Amino acid sequence: MLSEKTVLENILRSSTSMAIVAMDHDFRIVYYNPVAEKIFGYRADKVIGRTAMDMHLERKANSSLFEKAVETVRHNGSYKYTFEQKREGEIRFIEATVSGIWEGNNNLAGFVLMARDITEHKRLEEELLKAQKLESIGVLAGGIAHDFNNLLTGILNCITLSKSSVKPEDKVFESLTMAEKASRLAKDLTHQLFTFAKIGEPVKK
């Protein structure tokens, strides 16, 4: 017959995404599941029996977060926080929750820390934020390009009308031609803004 302890240990070990670390009231680690090994980089047989404070000192981590978590747990039952962890030259973001293990008449017998790696989630959030910013810039660029294009169309029409009223050998005709060329170059720039705003299609070479 399966014991309650065996069932519980198998449930904890079956977690594939959540690191689970259990500590007694002196913060001595008594349980450390395989996901914790992957996230924190220590094998269970190297940490069980050691205190959480020892681990923080060894990793040169910010122990104040954990201390604050413990103090909050004593008053509120649990505490959730996020911290950075450097492993193999890469910064990983870890989200953790520390909860109390209570016995009898509200006696705090220990703590359980549950943590997960949220690095990819944060990267996706950052990419989404960048995309939203680019979309906002695109909408702004499209609006400016549209208004500017209307102005240039009016200017070009006026230049064309003015050129039809003068002879090619007149000095003003040359000035109007130069203004016409400059206006058409400006219209080309507006088309580039339209492309950036996804109103037009880019030409690939």
Image (spheres, rainbow, N blue to C red):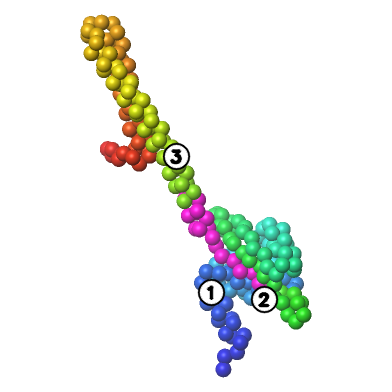
Judging depth in this view, the residue of 65 and 169 nearest the camera is 169
Q: Where does label 1 land, which residue?
A: 15
Residue at the spot x=72%, y=64% of the render? 72
Q: Residue at x 35, y 36 (%)?
A: 194
Locate residue 163: give its quadrant: top left
Please tell me which of labels 2 and 1 falls first in the chain: 1
Place of residue 15 in the rendered image (x, y in percent of width and height, measured from the top left): 53, 74
Sequence-wise first label, 3 or 2: 2
Disc 3, SS:
helix
Q: Residues within 10 Å of mark 3 (few under 14, many from 20)?
A: some
Q: Position of residue 132 (x, y in %)?
A: 46, 47
Q: Secondary structure at mark 1?
A: loop
Q: Disc number at residue 137? A: 3
Q: Quadrant of the N terminus?
A: bottom right
Q: In the rendered structure, does residue 124 fall within the stretch colored magenta?
A: yes
Q: Nearer the viewer, mark 3 or mark 1?
A: 3
Q: CA distance from mark 2 to mark 1?
A: 17 Å
- Please give the range of residues in magenta: 111-127
Determine whether 7 is above or below 181 in the image.
below
Residue that carries the numbered disc 2 in the rendered image? 30
Image coordinates of residue 94 in percent, x first then y, are: 58, 61
> In the rendered structure, are the residues bearing label 3 and label 2 in contact, judged by CB atoms less than 8 Å apart?
no
Q: Amino acid at mark 2?
A: Val
Precedes in sequence: disc 3 or disc 1: 1
Q: Would you say residue 43 sits in the magenta stretch?
A: no
